[in-house]
Image (cartoon, grey):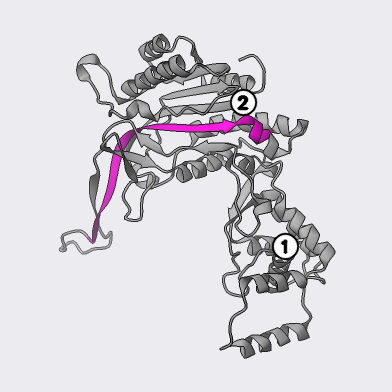
Amino acid sequence: MKLEIHIVQNFAPSNLNRDDTGSPKDCELGGVRRARISSQCYKRAIRDAFARHELLDEADQATRTKRLVEAVAERVVAAKKKVDPESAKRAAVRALGGGGLKADEGDTWKTQYLLFLPTRTIERLAALIAENLEALTPPQAETAAETQGDKAAKGKAAKSKKQEKSEAKDQVPSELREQIESLLADGSRTPELGLFGRMIADKPAWNIDAACQVAHAISTHRVSMEFDFYTAIDDLRRDDSSGSDMMGTIPFNSACFYRYLVVDVDDLIRNLGADEAARAQAKKTLAALVRAAVLAIPSGKQNSMAAHNPPSFILTDVRERGAPRSLANAFVEPVRPRSNEHSDLVEGSVLRLGELLAALDGVYGTDGRKDLSFCVVDPSETLAKSFGQKVPSAHHRASLQALVDAATAAAFGGAA
């Protein structure tokens, strides 16, 4: 079973996702330049929406970080009042080493990789370290010997990473090491990991294949880069001085975006645990994802431009089988506003979607479609009627909640 989400969203002047030069990201489609917002940017915005709008239980949320040592150490210190922060961090580094993860000791305290793990794992790992603090704290004499050994090793060939990790594992008792590895490897019952997956190069057994794929958002029309020239005045300048005290430019654009994501519901259930509890959690996760995808807005330059523009059109498509179908090719020919037909970029984009969707259904069939629903911001109600004429099988839902309920019910075998 697959759920696909198609969104048309028009943004006022903004710079929501910028490249290495500070300019809004773009790409070429159909031979013309388009505005673009990366899939990574939107996945981050969706995860932020989960938390900001309390769409997932706090216990089910995930954390992406290289600062696991500090997070764990803070909790160990809170649990063991007599432990100093430095000792707690060293114990955390040793514990992670036992689990096969390298972390910098004494400088940044960061892990080698940006880890994506259940937030509850931080709490459980801290509790495990606090219970086994003595086993994870090297004797003072050993610490001094290690320091002397480090000095003596200068100028000699460095140990291989494999040797370092092997030695780090050996420093932790085998039973405790197994507990740590099991704790770090477990990504079940965590919606964000189930949806977006996890990859750790040195730990392939810990990898999770994402159940959700997110496309780069692209503008449905040709876009031009513009620049905002700004100046700033010093509030304490003398009255006889003139001119600005700072000036610069900010690149921006304004675009109507097509956004697309698809979820394999069966893969999501499997990632969450493949039992009845996982199925119930997957249903709740899917509802949260549809709502979060609609509410997600990237944060780039928002303090300067406040482009808080919700989507104008949302379409959900639930099918039992068949390959996913992005509708991005509806915009190979850029949409153009037509004032004589009272058609703006949003309306033109929505109708293009309907035309391609109907054409694809005609050629490839509906692949066991369970529900096709849309929700539209349409004060005149003409757009909803026009889209319905192009795609007669689509159900017009009056609200986002009705759309979420219909899509979720259809994905899990209920009546839409």
- Dot 1: few (<14), some (14–19), or many (≥20) neighbours within 10 Å? many
Is residue 252 located in the magenta-colored stretch of the structure? yes
Q: In the image, what residue type sits under mark 1?
A: Gly
**Place of residue 387 in the rendered image (x, y in percent of width and height, measured from the top left):** 40, 14
Q: CA distance from mark 2 to mark 1?
A: 36 Å
Would residue 32 be seen by someone viewing this image from the given angle? Answer: yes
Q: Which residue is mark 2?
A: 1
Say the numbered circle drawn on residue 241.
none
Q: Residue at x 67, y 19 (%)?
A: 413
**Place of residue 339 in the rendered image (x, y in percent of width and height, measured from the top left):** 21, 19
Secondary structure under the numbered disc 1 in the rendered image: loop
Q: Which residue is mark 1?
A: 99
**Which range of residues does the magenta coloring cover?**
245-269
Question: In the rendered image of this protein, does residue 263 appear above or below residue 14?
Answer: above
- Dot 2: few (<14), some (14–19), or many (≥20) neighbours within 10 Å? some
Q: Mark 2 vs mark 1: which is more N-terminal? A: 2
Location of residue 134 (image quadrant): bottom right
Q: Residue at x 73, y 38 (%)?
A: 273
Extreme residue in the front direction: 363
**Place of residue 237 in the rendered image (x, y in percent of width and height, measured from the top left):** 23, 63
Which mark is in front, 2 or 1?
2
Q: How many marks?
A: 2
Callout 2–callout 1 Cβ contact below 8 Å: no
